[in-house]
Image (cartoon, rainbow, N blue to C red):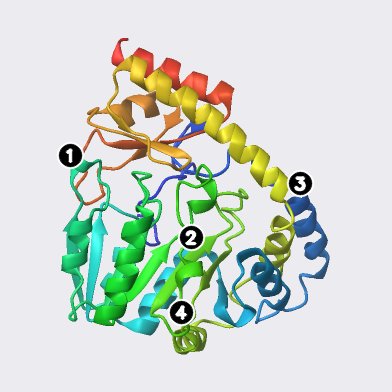
Amino acid sequence: MIIGNNYGHGGDIYRNKISLDFSANVNPYGTPEAVKEAIRKAADNVAVYPDPYCGELRKKLSAHTGASEDEIICGNGAAEIIFQFVEALRPGKTLLPVPSFSEYESALKVYGKEVELYLLKRENGFALTDDILERITEDTDLIMLCNPNNPTGQPIDGGLLFRILSRCRETGTWLFLDECFISLTEEGSCKYLYPQLREGDRVFLLNAFTKLYGMAGVRLGYGISKNKEMLERMCSIVQPWNVSALAQAAGCAALGCEEWADETRRRIFDEKKYLLAELEALGIEHIGGVANFIMLCKVPGLYEKMLEKGILIRSCANYHGLEDGDCRIAVKKHEENVELIEALKEVLGA
């Protein structure tokens, strides 16, 4: 028996004998050297408590995002902030479009009361449509969205996103928007919501350093809201020193790596074009989306067959609305992508 929470994500390389991990959607070019160096330097002072207010990090995030420092909250990864937000709100009824990131529902099972699942349609490529607007009512305390969505990579149309914001203002509904993958999309494919917000809006925006900067093992996320009452509530329930000194130093350094981020993003999407062309040639049904991953559809047994070859992909069978044969693959470096395609050819007999 493994003591711990019910882990249902990619990146579990510790219990699988693998040579390649395509299950975790982290920048394949790793962590910027400046971030590693900042962590090494910060390690010299680990005997000192970290800044409980993340002052320097929030200052740099303010300059990076355009939000004021008092609109920003930092946490031990995006997952902690999801649970922190839901605990602070304790919503009565939450509207949850699915399939989507599973930690929303995990947090709601602990701190929410009622979850209304809104099943996205396969025939629409699991894209969110205007139908969602009529499901947001005065009885809806919270709606949780992911832009672009995980595991499909589908963006929320900019016009629809702004209509959802308007509808939430009408009904008094909280909008929780996860933008963790938005920095790993092609430029212009997703709309940031912050410029549309007004003071006091019941909106919370989630982001993290995990994906773009290759910092999954550091655990550093942040949220933005113009609703100060919610931020104060969230701060009152989190443990002290929840963001380590190493994580704070890493985050500050990462925000200075814009050229590195731009270059790796360009290379990632060059590789994505290669993968999409190869999948098309193999006749594998897929949803390309706009993020740094691709969802493969209706290939039964693919997860197990690839694992036998030492390649870990993300089975999506545990997502609402998906099934055995739906899998997700990350975009990695070219030589790794070539190895993935060759393995797919072998297991499919192509």
Q: CA distance from mark 2 to mark 4?
A: 14 Å
Horizontal arrangement in the rendering, residue 57 relative to residue 214 (left or right) = right
The three-letter code of the residue at mark 3 reads Glu
Q: Return the residue found at the far front.
A: 159
Residue at x 33%, y 44% (from the top left corner): 152
Residue at x 26%, y 79% (from the top left corner): 170
Q: Is residue 96 above or below residue 303?
A: below
What is the secondary structure assignment of the residue under circle 2? loop
Horizontal arrangement in the rendering, residue 244 relative to residue 191 (left or right) = right
The residue labelled by disc 1 is 123
Label 2 neighbour load within 10 Å: few <14, some 14-19, many 20+ = some
Q: Is residue 127 above or below residue 177?
A: above
Sequence-first tag of 2 and 4: 2
The three-letter code of the residue at mark 1 reads Glu
The percent position of residue 344, horizontal first and vertical second, equals 37, 19
Residue at x 40%, y 51% (from the top left corner): 148
The residue labelled by disc 3 is 33
Q: CA distance from mark 1 to mark 2?
A: 27 Å
Q: Let me know if residue 171 appears in the view.
A: yes
- Mark carried by residue 198: 4
- Mark carried by residue 192: 2
Give the camera-side residue of 14 and 40.
Answer: 40
The percent position of residue 124, horizontal first and vertical second, equals 21, 42
What is the secondary structure assignment of the residue under circle 4? loop
Q: Is residue 2 above or below residue 113?
A: above
Q: Nearer the viewer, mark 1 or mark 2?
A: 2
Q: CA distance from mark 2 to mark 3?
A: 28 Å
The three-letter code of the residue at mark 2 reads Tyr
